[in-house]
Amino acid sequence: MAFIEARSGGPPDVPVSASLPCEVPVPRAYLTIQLRNHHAQGTPVLAHTLVRLDVGPQQHTRQTDANGLITFVYDTAADFANLAVNAELTDPSRLWVGQSNTGVLNQLTVIVAGQFQLRVEVYTDKPGVGLMAWPHAWTVGLNLARASTPPGGAPANANIPFVANGAVPPADEINNHLLDCASAHQLTVPFIGFLTTSTVELWTEGNPRVVGDLDAANDDATYRKIAANGIRLLVTRRGATLRVRFVFRFPQVMIVGEGTHFEYATGLASKYRNALANPTGLRWVVATQYDVTPILQVSDNLNIRHWQTNAWINHANQRQRVQTALTENLVNHGVQFDATNAGHWNAALLAYGAFEAVVFNNPHPGYGLHMCEVMGLTAHGGVRFKNGKAISVYSFGYGVALSVPARAPFVNHAQPTHYATQRSFVRGNGVGELNYQNLHTDAVNLQFAPAHTTPLALTITGAFRYANGQAIDPAWYGLVGEMPADTVDHYRSNVNTVGLQGYLMRCYRYHGPLVLKPGGWLFVNGSSNWDAMLTAGYSIHHAGANHAVPAMTNLANWPAHASYFVHYRTNFTSTDHHPSWYSDPAFNPHEPNINNARTFGRQY
């Protein structure tokens, strides 16, 4: 009374009994098992397939017949009642398994299937840093989009959620997720706006593989890249382990001349911080400064107007806003960037690679030529002779009013300065000098010939006078009541500082294309008064030769045109007098006039 044998095929067509000559025939019982394929449409039979079957204590390897059948022969049906049945395909490229129980049946079906393990990572290439795991906090709720198609079946779509791993900071990851063998799985991360240089990396059984546009196969896995930086996987072997890493590269924009509070840069970074949302996903924002500000020196207590609502905000923590942006898609260059210095442009290219766009964002005349009283503010109202007729305190490098002894050396002699600001852009060899020689009465229209961009040594007496034309009396300069009898309310420059703006623009347009990718854009967001200068080509003398620089195009109103518009309202930009970066925290500059600002640009 026991198991007799296992054979390929089904039971006999008619009852069969075993007998010996002159003996009474002995009846037999048959357990017939049919193997079916879970991974094919309609779960068809597995014909002519080698399979190992465990029925209770019996373990036998047999090949199925054309109908997917294997039969176990017993003395009686009671011998195989209520036994566990386990099946495993012995083909090392499949190893699929199935389970069942005989119960009181003598015919049963076992459906075999297999799953493989998948690990998924998301990385990005951060300018100046390199590859980094995608922080979970950047896109909470991120899913891996999956479209799975079984053989002969229709695709079924589903999402696999990413979870935070144990890294610091936590990064998005899918670990040991099981997917069906034999189905074709198309996997994508639903980011938008990424570059075509983004890649997919794959490891099979720990071995790195090259994922291309054509099918390749290793370790029982077939794979290729698909659109939208995705991957198509078809794995046949149960228990296979695959690791997929999506590496996303995003456009990067360089801001030339960001203010010391990073107001434009943080606004732009916020606009482009979401890789899942428009406008066009994530972009890296690399902020450069002429006057470098350590982040811990950015104010954490400002009274400003909110850049979106115009609501007044007391004690605004701009430092925290910058620090938050720096943990996301803002990159701080951190060292001085002088747009007139070819070495600084080359250093940026080496640090970050080429850019999709470079923006000189200056919708109001400025860039160090702020409408401020020299050596501090007065209490006598508005500013006359704007647009370059007043010169920044930073030409001499002091942010506060000086005592009479402290300022005396500047009155008639060019002297080394206190703060390391504006540097050789307006000074050379540690003494005050501007890179132009035009008088304030010269009609220059912001465009200067190379001969007019040579250094001019500065002294207080030589550079400034009262706005009414009177010479400055050193006995009054910088003191309370310095404006005689309140008949004047501002200093006036003896030289045309707008010429310095023109010189800067010439250098920016000449050097800027160096850091652009082919097809990249060089932008200037600036005053409509700059149209004549920026829409004309010119020749610049550099490195011992003259170089032709092509014209830019007046593209559109700045708010209406570019991806790089951010409407910011703070006490860092203004049409009223601007106390530069040493503003009193309660200073109210009113609304910056950017409505007439234009976007000028050229594609290279």
Image (cartoon, rainbow, N blue to C red):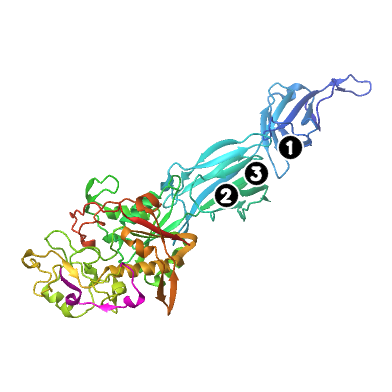
Residue 453 seen in the figure: no
Query: Mark 2 falls on what kind of element?
Result: strand
Q: Residues within 10 Å of mark 3 (few under 14, many from 20)?
A: many
- For discs 2 and 3, the disc positioned in front in the rendered view: 3
Circle nearer the viewer, 2 or 1: 2
Apparent side of residue 366 relative to residue 462 in the rendered image (left or right)? right
Per the model, the C-alpha gap separating discs 3 and 1 is 24 Å
Front-most of 44 and 338? 338
Sort mark 1 into few (<14), some (14-19) or many (20+) by Cα contacts within 10 Å. Answer: some
Which residue in the protein does label 2 denote? 243
Work out whether 419 lies above or below 266.
below
Quarter of the figure with residue 129: bottom left
Please tell me whether residue 490 is drawn above or below residue 457 in the rendered image: above
Give left or right: position of 194 versus 48.
left
Q: Residue 223, position in %: x, y?
A: 64, 48
Q: Earlier in the sequence, mark 2 or mark 3?
A: 3
Query: In which quarter of the view is residue 87 placed?
Result: top right
Q: Residue furthest top?
A: 24
Q: Does the CB distance between marks 2 and 3 fall below 8 Å?
A: no
Give the farthest residue toward the right: 21
The answer for how far apart the CA atoms under marks 2 and 1 are is: 30 Å
The residue at which mark 3 appears reads as: 234
Q: Amino acid at mark 3?
A: Leu
Query: Along the polypeptide, which appears first: circle 2 or circle 1?
Result: 1
> In the rendered structure, which segment of residues is drawn in magenta?
445-466
Q: CA distance from mark 2 to mark 3?
A: 13 Å
Q: Secondary structure at mark 3?
A: strand
Query: Type of residue at label 1?
Result: Arg
Position of the N terminus by quadrant: top right
> Can residue 71 be seen from the camera position used here?
yes
Check disc 1 and report the residue beneath it: 52
